[in-house]
Amino acid sequence: MSVFGYRVAHTLGFRPWEAAARHGDAPRILATEFNREQARAQAPWGAALDLGCGTGVHAVELARRGWQVTGVDIVRKAIRRATKRARAAGVDVRFLEGDITALPAQVGTGYRLILDFGAFHGLTDPERHALGRQVDTAAAADATLLMIAVEPGRRGPLPRGAAPTDITTAFPGWTIVDDVLLPKHPIGTLHLYRLRRADNRR
């Protein structure tokens, strides 16, 4: 989906990518994945980066858990809503307006946990490769990438989807270590992929 499409969707309040992460048993599955990541270390957990953060649903949840969170989205209205959500929740999240395929310099590096909950699967192939390079730069050596992507299909203006091979092609230095099927959703069959750097697959 184009940037214009995302801006229109936010204006209309039509955000199926956020609804998918709250649909059915998805919240429990996501909580399990966050718990799993925290079990790898001791608090404080470190830095987390939410790519295409939208209105900040997941960024705020990670901040509640004690992560130092940065969220990036290209839609200004989404960033404003995310900022209000964090303020209402009483947590500190840094939200930046920007293109996730060319991250703002202030994003920095050293992120142990990176989320992409519905951005990658809507990008073009060149954009996907650009995102892969950005993630490589931003991620810590022991980083985990959690990605929600819908299976490939024709959906008109909605995201075209992504297969595992699409993901590993765009992230050649990473390995998919888990593939969890999320609850059935009108947008299509959704998967939660856990990726680790190829030399650190646990």
Image (cartoon, rainbow, N blue to C red):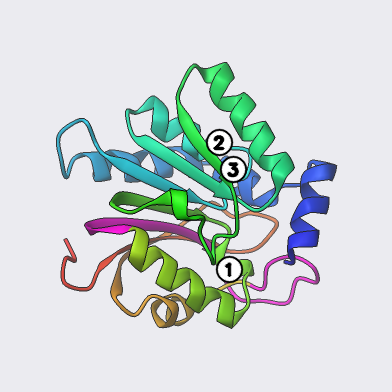
Left or right for 97, reference 47 = right
**Residue 69 among those drawn in magenta:** no
Q: Residue at x 50, y 59 (%)?
A: 103
Question: Mark 2: few, some, or many residues within 10 Å (few <14, many ≥20)?
Answer: some
Observer-nearest residue: 188 or 65? 65
Relative image position of residue 143 (x, y in whole percent): 26, 56
Q: Earlier in the sequence, mark 3 or mark 2?
A: 3
Name the image quarter holding residue 48.
Answer: top left
Observer-nearest residue: 29 or 106? 106
The residue wearing badge 1 is: 121
Q: Residue at x 61, y 34 (%)?
A: 82
Determine the secondary structure under disc 2: helix
**Residue 144 among those drawn in magenta:** yes
Q: Residue at x 51, y 55 (%)?
A: 104
Tell me how far mark 3 sits from mark 2, CA to CA.
13 Å
The residue wearing badge 3 is: 23
Tell me how far mark 3 sits from mark 1, CA to CA.
18 Å
Determine the secondary structure under disc 3: loop
Dividing the image into 4 quarters, which one contains the C terminus? bottom left
The residue wearing badge 2 is: 57
Q: Residue at x 47, y 32 (%)?
A: 93
Mark 3 or 1, closer to the camera: 1
Residue type, mark 2 in image: Val
Q: Which residue range is magenta in the image?
A: 139-160
Left or right for 150, reference 179 = right
